[in-house]
Image: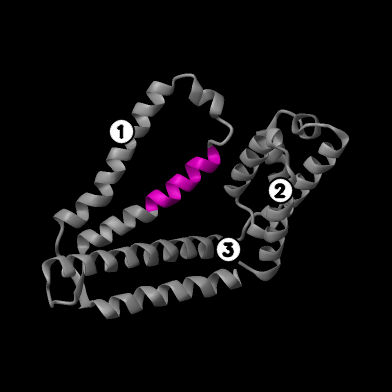
Amino acid sequence: MKKETKELLKKNNENEKNILEENDEIYTNMIVYLRGANISEYNQEKVREDLIAMILDGQERGDDIQKVIGENYKEICDEIIAEIPKKTVKENVMYALMLTLDIVWIVGVISVIKTLIIMLAKNSKDMTFVFSLGDLISWGMIVFVAYLVVYYICSTTFREKERETNKVLSFIIIWFICCIILCAIILPSLLIKETIFSVHIGVAALIFGTIFVISRIMSLRY
């Protein structure tokens, strides 16, 4: 994250603490929806800054968020987003790459720790970290699901009333989808053991540490 974006984010985080509880839910929904928009992080924070200022000014006058902004929150967000330049292809590619790298180093560290625990439990002297075809498929599914979850949360923020119409059906559908996703993530690494590469566990830790550093450097530049 660039310096100016980080400074604006910090400022907004401080200012939003002054939003009253009765206004906070709608404000939060608008920000979540905004996070899914195809605009840069800096522009997201600029819009967030304006929203916070409008809400706080309204609070000083004794007006709630409905009176300040209106009741068609999604339409208002869409109108604001439509006026802002969209992210370039390069920005979208860099965002996708940074998110992927973040997922890879996190899952990689977890895998290294798991391997170490298994080694200690078996009292094994074999310090080899094995990455299989099944692991590759599982990690790919994790990346895909992460994108899917982010998209779903951001795009369905204003559908609470629709979801409340049949909570039981919604729960069953979500539970079923979660089971399928878990199977798609876990089963490949358990069933497909064909080795892609194997290295000393220290080398594996160094590889994932390097990926972490690269992701941090990229986040400072884009």
Residue 150 is a magenta residue: yes
Q: From the top left corner, tell me how far across and down residue 46 is, in percent.
A: 73, 54
Residue visible at 47% across and 64% down?
A: 97
Residue type at numbered disc 2: Glu
Residue 80 sits above or below residue 214 on the image: above
Which badge, 1 or 2, comes first in the chain's sequence? 2
Asked whether 194 or 217 is in front, the reply is 217
Q: How is the image coloured?
A: one colour
Residue that protrudes farthest toward the right in the picture: 61
The answer to which of 33 and 67 lies nearer the viewer is 67
Numbered label attached to residue 91: 3
Q: Which mark is residue 16?
A: 2
Q: Position of residue 165 (x, y in %)?
A: 49, 19
Numbered tag placed on residue 90 in the rendering: none
Kindly indicate the quadrant of the structure image that contains residue 129: bottom left
Which label belongs to residue 176?
1
User: Which residue is at 60% across, 73% downward?
Assistant: 221
Closer to us: 46 or 39 = 46
Q: Is residue 63 left or right of residue 215?
A: right
Label 1 – label 2 distance at C-alpha: 37 Å
Question: Is residue 161 shown left or right of residue 26?
Answer: left
The disc, 1 or 3, on the residue closer to the chain's N-terminal end is 3
Q: Assess disc 3: are there few (<14), some (14-19) or many (≥20) residues with their C-alpha within 10 Å of its C-alpha.
A: some
Query: What's the amino acid at mark 3?
Result: Glu
